[in-house]
Structures are given as structure tokens and as C-alpha cells.
């Protein structure tokens, strides 16, 4: 063990002193004249609490776990989940100068150990907290905001867990514990359809949205389920404070647009940023008394005052209008982290309130929204703290925007694409356990849209495979009718989504080059990624994922490739990806694959077939089954003979060819 978890040290910092008082935690308890501290451990969950005897003001509480002295000699690799949904996660090598922070999770692994180690928070219910890893210790830090303790009150600090197992086992356990501790509500039905942001940005209108709804219905039939309008539908600016429809852009009103969308059998979504208000908003004069003018997460933009009861009344009024008048049943709530501090400032910036600790008030505001819209309305958080939203939101963004805009200070679109892909796969463990993951929009355009996103087809394929393997939302940000057929196929090929989550084969790889998503005990999807600027001949041994000789299918070309114990990708273009389905060799007649979609029909077709029944194919798709050697396939057309049996086309009877 690198972490000396049996000998942590309690460090108490007071606002009047720069020198913290430290205590050795013996038998999980520290007692002094001012308080009693206890660290309980049960079923892998560490639950610290503080019982106050007097009323000291506390700046911070830290629980420090020393690391073994020779730690750095073992070439440790670290993973940091960072602080916010839109942060890029970090993965790399440690040295003596490393200071790695996260408000959720930090893991570390050395060369000579199959197990990983680390610490992850399970709750964020009241206190602003973070984890710090340095070359000599792990520190669990609670910001006590200089508040005085109340004598006789018990302060339950945020729960956490310690990792001492292989990373995949830990992440499964970690996500399960978060879900249990927060009564999480991940959305069961994966959203798919259209989001307006990276298509129209703030220039949305009734005509544009209704056209996209019509085209969505035309191209996907009954396979999609959502139209979501992003910023621009409202009057005033991006942070107006009062959210009312822009009748110049939506002359018949938002409710009319919602009704037309609902007639297509789709959910209707709206974007809001309900925690912030812009000084230039036409409503700022009316709401200035609710704003924290000393808290500006963005220059010229203030957070609302979570101490003020009128703010919660404003939230209830806003979201009743959204549901009752505008008929929205899906909300993307953005810039939520601004209620806790300066956007992008990391873990050491916190807005302090008077009536309670900041995280408690943040959750009170989010729960107010949930209570107002009801349990059946979908809530997506974006630009938000992760654990602070757990149990309240159905979906959370797990990466930054795929497009940042044509600004020379921004990274290139290709740099962003790599970072987002890496973050999506490193945060795979949240999906379907804590919330449903949202990887951001599926953008594959091949023309200059003025936004700096001028990707090659290979790069569009790279991002499409990333979204497909995320197991989360598939919301394209394009006008389908204006895409070239190959790029449109990248979108339509993954609607409906398959909803299974890809995990990195090597979790501590900074840029995961191989990702596996397991459909069942017999079938998996494997994505291979080329981040380099050169052509690469990629070979992947199935032994790395515990599989032997299997049937391999190219999901992009939608065809059988070979039966082998390794995937051999032909020369892969720079900045590209490939997606393969790997299936154990069937021992009885079985539906094999369809050319219908990127997932080869595994999410739309039943596996079992009757040997004398042809399946119904649509829109030119081809359906294939496998008959092992010794089984008859009379009436079907044989396509490919393998050493193990025959692949046959089962669209039509032999007599129809």
C-alpha cells in the first residue's frame, strides 16, 4: 500500500492563524477542549464528523494520509477527475513538484503494482471540499468558510472512499457507492436528436427549429426523441435573470414551437442559466437586490444570492413558466458552478453565504428546480459541479464544448476534440450509475461555418466514434439536409443510440487508444484511435480484453472482416478512428449483423432466428445470420464461408434472388 490509510492526521486551520493544529487520529477519534472529531469506516465508506463543544471559527479541516517515502521511485501515473463537468480531466506522470487537485476523484498507479490507489468523494451535500495529491501525501480538504461552529451540533462532513484495488473494480464500486449515497436518478432512455447550440449558436428562430424537427422526423422516422433549443430563444442576454420568450424570433411563441415538436413524438428542451444575471440585462435593475455584486463568476455577470428567499421564489416562478406556459419537458441548465465561485478557478475559489455552507445552499437551489418541474421532467446539468448535482439531475455533461469558437487564444478544434474524447472515456464510470453521460454535440460538418470547426472526414469519424462509444446522449448540432451523405451517415448511423459505455483498455493512458464497450457476454464493440499526424497500421490483440479467437466486423464499412484473435486495422488515417464489433463464434444458428447502423443492428434486432423465416429489412439494409458447420440454411443465400460455418443473407428467400 502506498497510502498509509491506518495513520491519517487531522489538521485544523483557524482563520486567525496560518499555522494549522494537527492531531494524530487514533482509533478514528480526536478529542480536545473545542470539539470531538470521529472518522468512521464501514463497507468501504469513510464518514467523518465533528461534534462541537464550543464555537470556534474554522477555516478548513484536512485529513492527511502520508505516502510511502519511495513512492516517486516507482514511476507513478495519476488520474484527476478535476472539478467541474466542463473541465478536461488530467492524466500523466508524477514528480516531486506535482500538486494534483480534484473535487471528486484522484487515482494513482505505479509500474510494479496491478492495483490502483486513490481517494474519491462520495457526497457533496453541504461542504465545499477537494482532494490534493502531492509527492508525500493525499489530503482530503474541507473548506469551513471561516464560520463559527454551533455548540452541541454534529457536523457530518462529506463522505469518501479509498481505492486499493484494480482500477476497473474500483470505478465500478465507486460509481455504485455514489449512486447509493445520493439516491441517483440516471435517465434510462438515452436522448437522441437535435441541439441548436453548435449549429445556430444564439441565432435560433421558430422557422429554424421547426425545420430541424421536420428533418429529424424525415431522416430518423421514430428513432429520435428530442429537440433542444439552446441559448438565444429568450429575450435580453445570455444571463437575463428573468426568462421570457423572444417574440421576434418566435412570433407564435415558444408554446407553439413546443406543440409542433411534441406532435412529432419528441421531447421539447430549453436551455437556461438560472444562477447568473448580466449587468447589461434589461431586467438587472429589477433583480439587482437578488444579485451578489461581490461575486462575479464571469466579468460583468453576477451570481444570485442563495441567502435570499426571494431567489428561490424566482426559481419557482421561472420553471413554472417553462413547464406550464412553454410546455418544456427537458432542460439544459448551464453555468451552475458560478453559484459556488469563479468559473474556471478550480477548487480554491468559493462564494461564501451567511445562512449555511455554500454547497448546502447550492443543492437547495437545484432541488427547488427539481421540485418545481417534477420527477418526470428531464434535467441536464452543464458547466456544473459533479457530485453537488448527483441525485437531482438525470444527465450531466462530462466534457467541455466540442467547439470553442474561432479565437486565436483558444486551442484548435483538433486539440479540443482530443481533450474531449479523453475526458469522455475517463469519466465513463458515471454513466448509468450516477447519471446519464452527455458527451456534447455530435458535430461532423465539412464546411467553414465561421466557428473554426473545419474538420476532415477522418476527424469527423474520430468524434463520431467517440460519441457512439460514450454510451450517452447523441445530439447532433447540424442541419442534416446540408451535410454531405458520408457525414450525414455518421449521425444517422447511431440513432437510436446503443447506450453501452466504452471504457479505456488502459485507464492511465493520457489519450486512450483502445476503448471497449461490452454489450453482453458474447459481443463487444472496440474503438481504436489514431491521435497522431501520421498514417498508422494498428493491430489490437483481443487477449488484452480477455477474449480469444472471435468473429470481427467493421462497423464503419458495415461488413464482416475476419475471424481472428486480433483486430488488424488497415492503414489508419491521421486523426482518425475505427470501430469494430467482436462476437464469439456462435454454436447455433444466430442473427449476426445488419447494415442498418453503426452498431450493426445489435440494438434493434433480436439475436435468435428461426431457420426458415426471413427477417424484414428496411431502406436497403442487409441482414446476415451465421450457421455453424453442420446446420442447414436452405432457402437463404450463402455469402461467406468461414472455417467455422457460413454467413448467409436472410433478407429474402433464395428463390427471390
Image (cartoon, helix red, strand yellow):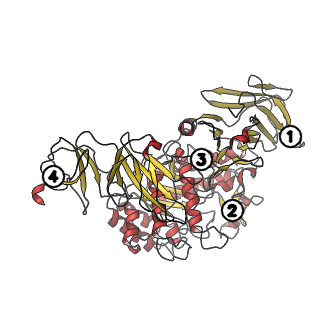
Q: CA distance from mark 1 to mark 2?
A: 36 Å
Residue 537, how many percent across, how many down? 46, 59
In space, the residues marked 3 and 4 are separated at their CA atoms by 47 Å
- Label 1: which secondary element: loop
Q: Residues within 10 Å of mark 4 (few under 14, many from 20)?
A: many
Number of the label disc, if any, that sits on residue 287: 2
Q: Which residue is mark 1?
A: 14
Name the residue beneath numbered marker 4.
636
Contact? badges 1 and 3 (CB < 8 Å): no
255 sits to left or right of 76: left
Q: Position of residue 81 (x, y in %)?
A: 63, 48
Measuring from the top left, give residue 582's x and y in whole percent.
37, 48
Tag nearer the camera, 1 or 2: 1
Q: Earlier in the sequence, mark 3 or mark 4?
A: 3
Q: Earlier in the sequence, mark 1 or mark 3?
A: 1
> Is there a contact, CB below 8 Å, between mark 3 and mark 4?
no
Amino acid at each position: 500500500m502506498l497510502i498509509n490509510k491506518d495513520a491519517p492526521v487531522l489538521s485544523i486551520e483557524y482563520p486567525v492563524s496560518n499555522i494549522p493544529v494537527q492531531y494524530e487520529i487514533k482509533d478514528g477519534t480526536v478529542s480536545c477542549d473545542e470539539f470531538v472529531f470521529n472518522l468512521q469506516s464501514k463497507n468501504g465508506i469513510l464518514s467523518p464528523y465533528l461534534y462541537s463543544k464550543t464555537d470556534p471559527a474554522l477555516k478548513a479541516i484536512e485529513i492527511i494520509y502520508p505516502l510511502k517515502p519511495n513512492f516517486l521511485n516507482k514511476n507513478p501515473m495519476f488520474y484527476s477527475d478535476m472539478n467541474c463537468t466542463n473541465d478536461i480531466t488530467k492524466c500523466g506522470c508524477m514528480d516531486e513538484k506535482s500538486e494534483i487537485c480534484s473535487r471528486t476523484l484522484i487515482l494513482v498507479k505505479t509500474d510494479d503494482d496491478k492495483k490502483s490507489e486513490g481517494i474519491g468523494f462520495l457526497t457533496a451535500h453541504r461542504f465545499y471540499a477537494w482532494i490534493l495529491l502531492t509527492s508525500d501525501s493525499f489530503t482530503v480538504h474541507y473548506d469551513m468558510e471561516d464560520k463559527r461552529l454551533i455548540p452541541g451540533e454534529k457536523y457530518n462532513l462529506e463522505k469518501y472512499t479509498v481505492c486499493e484495488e484494480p482500477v476497473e473494480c474500483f470505478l465500478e464500486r465507486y460509481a455504485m457507492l455514489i449512486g447509493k449515497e445520493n439516491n441517483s436518478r440516471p435517465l434510462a432512455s438515452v436522448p437522441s436528436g437535435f441541439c441548436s447550440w453548435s449549429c445556430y449558436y444564439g441565432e435560433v428562430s421558430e422557422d429554424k427549429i421547426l425545420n430541424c424537427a421536420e428533418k429529424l422526423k424525415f431522416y430518423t422516422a421514430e428513432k429520435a426523441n428530442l429537440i433542444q433549443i439552446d441559448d438565444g430563444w429568450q429575450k435580453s442576454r445570455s444571463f437575463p435573470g428573468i426568462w421570457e420568450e423572444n417574440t421576434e424570433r418566435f412570433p407564435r411563441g415558444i408554446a407553439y414551437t413546443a406543440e409542433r415538436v411534441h406532435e412529432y413524438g419528441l421531447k421539447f428542451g430549453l436551455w437556461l442559466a438560472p444562477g447568473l444575471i448580466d449587468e447589461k440585462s434589461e431586467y438587472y435593475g429589477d433583480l439587482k437586490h437578488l444579485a451578489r455584486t461581490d461575486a462575479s463568476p464571469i466579468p460583468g455577470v453576477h451570481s444570485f444570492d442563495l441567502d435570499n428567499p426571494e431567489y428561490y421564489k424566482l426559481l419557482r416562478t421561472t420553471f413554472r413558466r417553462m413547464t406550464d406556459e412553454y410546455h418544456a419537458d427537458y432542460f439544459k441548465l448551464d453555468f451552475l458552478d458560478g453559484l459556488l465561485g469563479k468559473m474556471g478557478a478550480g477548487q480554491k475559489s468559493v462564494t461564501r453565504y451567511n445562512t449555511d455552507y455554500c454547497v448546502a445552499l447550492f443543492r437547495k437551489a437545484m432541488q427547488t428546480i427539481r421540485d418545481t418541474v417534477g420527477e418526470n421532467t428531464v434535467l441536464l446539468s452543464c458547466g456544473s459541479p459533479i457530485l453537488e448535482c448527483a441525485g437531482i439531475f438525470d444527465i450531466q455533461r462530462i466534457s467541455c464544448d466540442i467547439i470553442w469558437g474561432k479565437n486565436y487564444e483558444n486551442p484548435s478544434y483538433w486539440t479540443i476534440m482530443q481533450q474531449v474524447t479523453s475526458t469522455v472515456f475517463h469519466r465513463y464510470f458515471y454513466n448509468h450509475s450516477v447519471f446519464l453521460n452527455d458527451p456534447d454535440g455530435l458535430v461532423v460538418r465539412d464546411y467553414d461555418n465561421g466557428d473554426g470547426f473545419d474538420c476532415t472526414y477522418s476527424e469527423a469519424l474520430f468524434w463520431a466514434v467517440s460519441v457512439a462509444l460514450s454510451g450517452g446522449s447523441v445530439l447532433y448540432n447540424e442541419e442534416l439536409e446540408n451535410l454531405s451523405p458520408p457525414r450525414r451517415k455518421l449521425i444517422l448511423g447511431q440513432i437510436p443510440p446503443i447506450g453501452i459505455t466504452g471504457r479505456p483498455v488502459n485507464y492511465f493512458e493520457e489519450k486512450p487508444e483502445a476503448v471497449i464497450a461490452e454489450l453482453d457476454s458474447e459481443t463487444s464493440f472496440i474503438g481504436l484511435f489514431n491521435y497522431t499526424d501520421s498514417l498508422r497500421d494498428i493491430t489490437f490483440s483481443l487477449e488484452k480484453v480477455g477474449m480469444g479467437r472471435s468473429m470481427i466486423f467493421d462497423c464503419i464499412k458495415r461488413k464482416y472482416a475476419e475471424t481472428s484473435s486480433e483486430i488488424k486495422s488497415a492503414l489508419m488515417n491521421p486523426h482518425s478512428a475505427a470501430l469494430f464489433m467482436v462476437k464469439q463464434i456462435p454454436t447455433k444458428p444466430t442473427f449476426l449483423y445488419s447494415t442498418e447502423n453503426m452498431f450493426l443492428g445489435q440494438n434493434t434486432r433480436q439475436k435468435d432466428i428461426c431457420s426458415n423465416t426471413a427477417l424484414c429489412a428496411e431502406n436497403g439494409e442487409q441482414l446476415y445470420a451465421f450457421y455453424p458447420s453442420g446446420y442447414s440454411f436452405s432457402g437463404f443465400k450463402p455469402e461467406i464461408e468461414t472455417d467455422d460455418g457460413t454467413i448467409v443473407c436472410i433478407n429474402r428467400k433464395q428463390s427471390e434472388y
